[in-house]
Amino acid sequence: MAWLRRGLTISSLLSLGLAALFATAAGPVDVADARFSFCITCHGANAQGNPGVAAPRLGGLPAWHIDNQLKAFQAGWRGTAKGDEHGDVMRTMALALANDEAVRDAAAWAAALNAPAPAATLLGGDPTAGKALYAPCAACHGAEGQGQEALGAPPLAGQNDWYLETQLEHYLAGRRGFDPADSRGQQMRALAGTVSTPQQRRDLLAYLATLSTKAP
Ligand code: HEC
Ligand code: HEC
């Protein structure tokens, strides 16, 4: 403990104390946290996604993305447009989280769940054509579809293909990315124009499915 006797100052004591506090506040995530058990009624036991109620995979996605989207629902950037019934359901759920701390904890909880990467479900896509269509997307979403935190661009590999298809339709129809305050959504809405036909979207999703097999 020589370092203790030599180097102990008020400021090092303070920083030691703060580090301990942060470690406690961040804490290990309790995957059985009862506050969030209602989430799995729709998203599935490991939040692996449930097409029956159109609820996507959350387990294993990064906490920052889940946090961003819960706040987007709360702000009304998602789930308020006409024709977005599934978003409307999820917005009600997001509003049940009382404050930013609950949102943060819910995001950390969902990210910690161990959900397997989803299987491809959509038919009729050509992954070779999709690879070319994916090229401009890779700048933000990453060459492997792994996402990029600095841009708030979520992973696309590892997400349910049926969910991504719906979300692209939402951006194109202006049901997502319509609010000027939603800079991330607005950015993405402009990009959705590069896959404007249903066949282009199927091709792109067939390619993303090949990346999903490698996703965590
Ligand atoms: C009643 C069913 C239901 C419950 C309960 C529910 N969700 Fe959802 N959730 C959905 C549906 C449906 C969607 C898809 C919305 C859409 O298509 O825009 C969704 C979407 C999401 C998304 C967006 C994911 C993405 O990548 O865009 C997040 C994040 C999310 N839910 C988190 C949660 C969390 C955390 C809880 C618990 C606090 C929860 N959900 C409870 C139905 C539910
Ligand atoms: C300039 C950066 C950028 C580019 C390029 C880009 N995206 Fe995005 N994308 C984002 C951001 C940021 C978000 C989060 C938007 C939000 O919060 O609504 C997003 C969200 C998405 C979502 C919603 C995912 C979810 O879980 O909710 C899909 C699907 C998507 N992008 C597909 C694509 C495709 C396909 C392309 C190429 C045609 C593409 N993106 C190009 C930045 C980008």
Image (cartoon, rainbow, N blue to C red):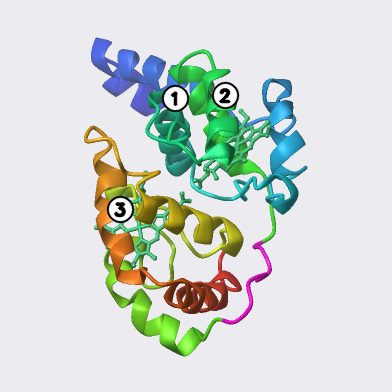
At label 2, the amino acid type is Thr
Horizontally, is 183 left or right of 119 in the view?
left
Residue annotated with mark 3: 189
Instruction: Compare marks 3 and 2 and give the one earlier in the sequence.
Output: 2
Horizontally, is 192 left or right of 85 in the view?
left
Give the foreground label among 3 and 1.
3
Horizontally, is 69 left or right of 37 in the view?
left
- Quarter of the image where one finds residue 180: top left
Q: Main secondary structure of the magenta part?
A: loop
Q: Secondary structure at mark 2?
A: helix
Front-most of residues 72 and 148: 72
Q: Secondary structure at mark 3?
A: helix
- Marks 3/1 in contact by CB < 8 Å: the verdict is no
Residue annotated with mark 1: 74
Q: Position of residue 79 (x, y in %)?
A: 48, 34
**110 is within the stretch colored magenta:** no
Going 72% across and 38% down the picture, which residue do you hit?
Answer: 42
Q: Which residues are magenta?
A: 117-124
Going 63% across and 77% down the picture, which residue do you hit?
Answer: 123
Residue annotated with mark 2: 92
In the image, farthest residue toward the bottom: 128
The answer to whether one can see residue 129 in this image is: yes
Q: Secondary structure at mark 1?
A: helix
Q: Position of residue 81 (x, y in %)?
A: 43, 36
At label 3, the amino acid type is Arg
At label 1, the amino acid type is Gln
As drawn, the label of residue 134 is none
Instruction: Compare marks 3 and 1 and give the one earlier in the sequence.
Output: 1
